[in-house]
Image (cartoon, grey):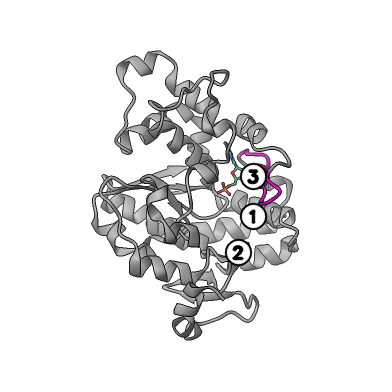
């Protein structure tokens, strides 16, 4: 057992659990896995969140990329990394040395916080890190310091569809009916999806200078203006010269689905539990219509309508 899991064993044992999915426990209003190991490290589990809440100290210059799983986290990581490091790495695809995003995964360029590796050495993130932790469970210093938070959301039908494929790729397939049941009742890792989104959405309204709320669908529709918005928000806006020299378009191309998919293909990463290509499938909006039944779609739309009632927000 890892030291972290051991440290929070008693606290975790008091949390409500879930008969339908024994791996989940409810912490601060969201479902989380507990005692979960990847490569014998306790990663992405509630114990690591508790440790971050106790120990993590945000810096005012930090940028946190936040999301519910399967909403475009990998894309946001790539875009943010390319934007913030554009003076260091050339953006042209053919230039040498190759841009890091052409040889290593966006997940290696921008680490997730809720891992033991990060907890043991937070400085290796270089001020740019990602997390799926719900807004209300973020370490207090992230909320109180002057750092920036960027959130990406996506419509729930495509999130469920993406999730379902992800589990199949992981060789832990789950029936779509069962996945739908659990997801629609909020019983998935970091669920409820809707509460996750709404938490960050409300925070972005209350603190617009601190929390930027992006949508996967907007990034697809108008990448140029979204990328400019992102660069400005993280404190690294495009200069007038860059606006004309194609920098924005180069970043969009570098981080585009086709390019990242190609760069992350392959068998060289066999030492990893999750191969790098697992995060790339189709990358389109509305693919859920090819998988979900009409009834599932209606149910998810109804939940969205109820959850977003009174909010100036839709997916
Ligand atoms: P699909 O399964 O619908 O194709 P996350 O990164 O949060 O795990 O989300 C994964 C989803 O984002 C997958 O969606 C994946 O294909 C898509 N994705 C990954 N990189 C992308 C990119 N550069 N552009 C658009 N979509 C991307």
Tag 3 and tag 2, C-beta contact below 8 Å: no
Residue 25 horizontal side relative to residue 52, left or right:
right
Q: Residues within 10 Å of mark 1 (few under 14, many from 20)?
A: some
The secondary structure type at the circle numbered 1 is helix
Q: Residues within 10 Å of mark 2 (few under 14, many from 20)?
A: many
**Residue found at x 63% / y 46%:** 279
Q: Residues within 10 Å of mark 3 (few under 14, many from 20)?
A: many
- Residue indicated by mark 3: 276
Which of marks 2 and 3 precedes in the sequence?
A: 2
Is residue 114 visible in the rendered image? The answer is: yes
Tag 2 and tag 1, C-beta contact below 8 Å: yes
The secondary structure type at the circle numbered 3 is helix
Q: Is residue 172 magenta?
A: no
User: Nearest the camera: 141 or 88?
Assistant: 88
Which region is colored magenta? 269-284
- Residue indicated by mark 2: 183
Which of marks 1 and 2 precedes in the sequence?
A: 1
Residue 209 horizontal side relative to residue 137, left or right:
left
From the viewer's perspective, is residue 108 above or below residue 30? above
User: Which one is in front in this view, the residue at disc 3 or the one at disc 1?
Assistant: 3
User: Which one is in front in this view, the residue at disc 3 or the one at disc 2?
Assistant: 3
* Image spot of residue 294 (x, y percent): 70, 54
User: Nearest the camera: 202 or 20?
Assistant: 20
- Residue indicated by mark 1: 163
User: Which one is in front in this view, the residue at disc 2 or the one at disc 1?
Assistant: 1
The secondary structure type at the circle numbered 2 is helix
Per the model, the C-alpha gap separating discs 3 and 2 is: 25 Å
Per the model, the C-alpha gap separating discs 2 and 1 is: 10 Å
From the viewer's perspective, is residue 152 above or below residue 170? above
Per the model, the C-alpha gap separating discs 3 and 1 is: 16 Å
């Amino acid at each position: 057992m890892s030291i972290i899991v051991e440290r929070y064993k008693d606290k975790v044992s008091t949390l409500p659990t879930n008969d339908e999915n024994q791996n989940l426990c409810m912490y601060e209003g969201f479902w989380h896995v507990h005692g979960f190991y990847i490569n014998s490290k306790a990663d992405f589990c509630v114990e690591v969140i508790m440790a971050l809440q106790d120990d993590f100290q945000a810096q005012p210059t930090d940028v946190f990329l936040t999301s519910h799983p399967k909403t475009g986290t990998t894309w946001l990581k790539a875009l943010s990394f390319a934007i913030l490091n554009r003076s260091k790495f050339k953006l042209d695809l053919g230039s040498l040395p190759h841009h890091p995003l052409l040889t290593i995964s966006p997940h290696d360029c921008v680490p997730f916080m809720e891992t033991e590796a990060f907890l043991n050495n937070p400085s290796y993130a270089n001020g740019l890190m990602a997390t799926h932790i719900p807004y209300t469970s973020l370490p207090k210093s992230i909320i109180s310091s002057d750092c920036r938070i960027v959130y990406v959301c996506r419509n729930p039908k495509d999130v469920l569809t993406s999730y379902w494929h992800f589990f199949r790729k992981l060789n832990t397939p789950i029936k779509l009916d069962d996945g739908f049941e659990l997801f629609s009742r909020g019983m998935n890792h970091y669920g409820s999806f809707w509460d996750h989104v709404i938490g960050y959405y409300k925070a972005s309204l209350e603190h617009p200078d601190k929390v930027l709320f992006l949508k996967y669908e907007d990034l697809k529709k108008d990448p140029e203006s979204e990328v400019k918005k992102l660069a400005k928000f993280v404190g690294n806006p495009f200069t007038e010269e860059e606006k004309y020299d194609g920098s924005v378009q180069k970043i969009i191309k570098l981080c585009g689905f086709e390019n990242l998919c190609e760069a992350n293909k392959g068998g060289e990463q066999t030492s990893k539990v999750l191969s790098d290509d697992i995060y790339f499938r189709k990358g389109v909006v509305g693919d859920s219509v090819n998988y979900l039944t009409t009834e599932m779609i209606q149910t998810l739309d109804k939940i969205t309508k109820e959850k977003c009632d009174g909010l100036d927000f839709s997916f």
